[in-house]
Image: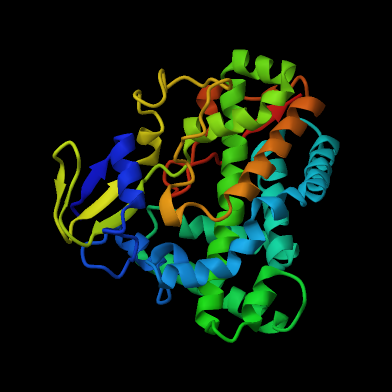
Amino acid sequence: MPCWVLTDYHHVRTVLSDRRFSADVRQPGFPFLSPGRRELVGEQPSFLRLDDPEHQRLRRMMTGDFLVKRIEQLRPRIQRIVDEALDAMIAKGQPADLVADFAFPVPSLVICELLGVPYDDHEYFQELSRRLLDSTAGPGAVAEALDALTDYMAQLAASKKGEPDGIVARLATRDDLTPEEVASNSVLLLLAGHETTANMTSLSVLALLQNPDQLARLRAEPELTRGAVEELLRYLTIVHNGLPRTALEDVEFDDGLQIRAGEGVLVMLGAANRDEELFGDGDRLDIGRDARRHLAFGFGVHQCLGQPLARVELQIALATLLRRLPELRLAIPFEDVRFRTSALIYGLHELPVAW
């Protein structure tokens, strides 16, 4: 379907912060990349695809679970999870697949513990999430996977109602949420909680290995880790297909660009994060860069709820890998690395490494 594609940093930031642009998938003109993407919305959209006040009503029920202070308290537990995953990968022997043996297990276990989802089911929900996020999947395949994952979360929520621990149990206990709202928002948290960080972890390692000067600097100056994570988020920006919005009324930008009511918009985060006006030499990875204005987590009221968790997981995972595996390297030629080019969340199919 026709829509505007915006790549300029200021255009992107304006759209994401202007209430005249709607994130509600039910609005006429809302841009979908394919019939399968339309099907992914389901019958009950999560808060990600709603406008205020519905968006805020649902989002604020989960905000407290992802506050910076709360996530910082999880650092020791996340560190143990990272160390245990790395222990298992090393014991398994080399070459290892960093994606399957490390990048996916870590955030999957963390989000399972936060939500109260049994980690033993991770292979099941990861397979469903892969089908859901495949941009080439047809409506039937997406609907089948979405129904299965929604039913899984609905049954889990019903079984956990009244239990003291876990976000799903707490949401299921609320009287102001329907079972459908509990299930759809739990699915969103589960998908976003492991797919994004897992792919960022493996891509970040690959980016560092392909930029040995930056890798060497980070090894020599581990205190740069926090800033390096922000630069990697900017440099990689794993949401490559853009964030969709639709104009609720005519909008004219400062530079004369005009978008009419009912027209769809895709804002391209990756292009905005390499806007030379904000990030000079933006196609180059520079872990010493001040990248804090990046838009990898979006902007405005819909910016990523779980960004404090993603940051901590990436900081711990990368710092631990570089400290414990000083000779980490690719086990295959770079040209043989397979990228997930058909997925809504960009990443790698596998990343064979040795050490």
**Is residue 71 depicted above or below 37 in this figure?**
above
Residue 300 is left or right of residue 177, and the answer is left
Residue 295 is left or right of residue 126, and the answer is left
Q: Position of residue 321 (x, y in %)?
A: 75, 31
* Residue in front for this viewpoint, 128 or 115: 115
Q: Residue 97, can we see it? A: no
Q: Quadrant of the C terminus?
A: top right
Which quadrant would residue 108 be assigned to in this image?
bottom right
Q: Position of residue 18 (x, y in %)?
A: 31, 53
Which residue shows up at 62% across the image and 46% down it?
A: 310
* Residue in front for this viewpoint, 254 or 1: 254
* Residue in front for this viewpoint, 255 or 279: 255
| Outermost residue to the bottom | 175
Q: Position of residue 327 (x, y in %)?
A: 76, 19
| Outermost residue to the front | 254
Which residue shows up at 18% across the image and 56% down it?
A: 263
Which quadrant would residue 313 be assigned to in this image?
top right
Which residue shows up at 63% across the image and 42% down it?
A: 311
Which residue shows up at 56% across the image and 41% down it?
A: 349
* Residue in front for this viewpoint, 159 or 182: 182
**Is residue 212 depicted above or below 203 in this figure?**
above
